[in-house]
Image: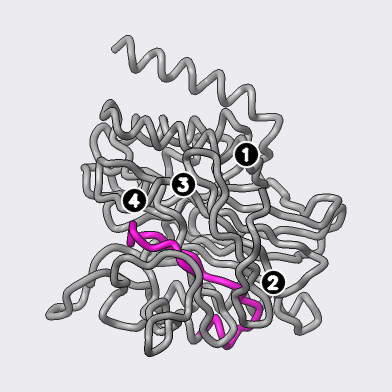
């Protein structure tokens, strides 16, 4: 009882400290240098009071201290043990204390411990830094949305950041394996993209998307010899058996620069298919689950002066930077280490 009361007091203090930093409808802008930086944490598999999980919180602080991002995206399998809400509290407290806004979308393991994704999202919305918005989609309305980043000192959208719930497991009898982005979610995405395009003089607005389970096209992007990528590929892509058409609709709408996922802990590569970068975040977990890579995070930096391209790299738990690449004109170019 004392521990619960202490947590509520701390949460109240955090909320009061950051209520002036995060407005209810926060507006995001490129900075005065025209830059916007995103950090993706994925597959933390946090379990409260299990010692290996503390290393993930330490890693998050290292990444945030080094990168100072404009926003964070959590792409699923974040808390995978009881007590669930207390575990989420530990994770998002790191983000709140670093005063960085964030959005959350779920993986296939988040709702397996007695608390539904809807309940988790409702809890997260009590934190001032959580930018999720509910009710965007009729059936799969949980943990889907779009963040608009405007040009510096304007209200002109210059970058769209979609976070989409890729669901968990197949819902089709006789079809095994993982879930996919559903038809009504794709319809929602199309409506959003078309509205932004029309408001932009029939020109697509540059966009990035984040979700947990890879698309079937993530594997296709590697080419027939499986060598057309930059980064690490240790395991086979665990995509759904069925292709629901998300990638096709990204192509049709235009503007999509890249789609980044988690799920497969031992991959952190980026490849390009038909001009869209398909990549993985860096595994952000610990030995609570399987681990072949040092934990860290993916960092993506967009420059409004260079439309249609971005820089991306890994920031690891030891503070080092790894695998910087530039994605431009449908190609991935490796760069020299920048620090």
In the picture of the structure, the residue carrying the numbered disc 1 is 66
Secondary element at image label 4? loop
Q: Is residue 132 visible?
A: no
Q: Which x, y percent locates residue 332?
A: 59, 75
Disc 2 and disc 4: Cα gap in Å? 28 Å
Disc 3 and disc 1: Cα gap in Å? 12 Å
Labels 3 and 2: the sequence-earlier one: 3
Labels 2 and 4: the sequence-earlier one: 4
In the picture of the structure, the residue carrying the numbered disc 2 is 309
Can you tell which of label 2 and label 4 is closer to the viewer?
A: 2
Disc 4 and disc 1: Cα gap in Å? 24 Å
- Which quarter of the rendering shows the N terminus? top left
Q: Quadrant of residue 220?
A: bottom left
Residue 298 relative to residue 292: left or right: right
Q: Measured along the vertical axis of the image, is residue 209 above or below residue 19?
A: below
Labels 3 and 1: the sequence-earlier one: 1
In the picture of the structure, the residue carrying the numbered disc 4 is 77
Disc 2 and disc 1: Cα gap in Å? 23 Å
Looking at the image, what colour scheme do you see? one colour
Secondary element at image label 1? helix
Bounds of the magenta span? Answer: 249-270
What residue is drawn where x is 60% and y is 60%?
Answer: 324
């Amino acid at each position: 009882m004392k521990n619960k009361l202490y947590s509520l007091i701390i949460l109240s203090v955090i909320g009061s400290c950051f209520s002036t930093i995060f407005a209810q409808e926060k507006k995001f802008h490129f900075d005065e240098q025209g830059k916007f930086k995103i950090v993706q944490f994925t597959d933390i598999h946090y379990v409260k009071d299990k010692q290996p999980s503390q290393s993930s919180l330490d890693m998050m602080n290292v990444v945030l201290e080094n990168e100072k991002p404009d926003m964070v995206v959590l792409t699923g399998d974040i808390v995978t043990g009881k007590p669930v809400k207390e575990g989420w509290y530990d994770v998002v407290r790191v983000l709140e204390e670093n005063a960085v806004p964030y959005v959350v979308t779920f993986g296939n393991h988040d709702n397996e411990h007695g608390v539904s994704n809807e309940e988790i999202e409702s809890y997260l919305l009590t934190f001032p830094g959580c930018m999720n918005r509910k009710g965007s989609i009729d059936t799969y309305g949980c943990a889907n949305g779009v963040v608009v980043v405007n040009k510096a000192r304007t209200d002109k959208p210059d970058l769209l950041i979609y976070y989409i719930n890729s669901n968990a497991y197949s819902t089709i009898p006789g079809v095994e394996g993982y879930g996919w982005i559903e038809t009504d979610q794709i319809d929602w995405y199309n409506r959003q993209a078309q509205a932004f395009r029309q408001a932009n003089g029939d020109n697509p607005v540059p966009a990035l998307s984040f979700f947990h389970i890879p698309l079937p096209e993530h594997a296709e992007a590697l080419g027939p010899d499986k060598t057309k990528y930059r980064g690490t590929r240790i395991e086979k892509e665990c995509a759904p058996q069925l292709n629901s058409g998300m990638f096709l609709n990204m192509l049709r709408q235009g503007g999509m620069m890249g789609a980044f996922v988690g799920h497969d802990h031992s991959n952190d590569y980026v490849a390009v298919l038909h001009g869209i970068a398909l990549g993985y975040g860096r595994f952000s977990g610990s030995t609570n689950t399987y681990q072949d890579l040092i934990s860290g995070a993916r960092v993506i930096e967009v420059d409004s002066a260079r439309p249609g391209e971005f820089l991306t790299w890994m920031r690891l738990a030891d503070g080092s930077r790894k695998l910087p690449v530039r994605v431009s004109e449908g190609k991935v170019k490796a760069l020299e280490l920048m620090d």
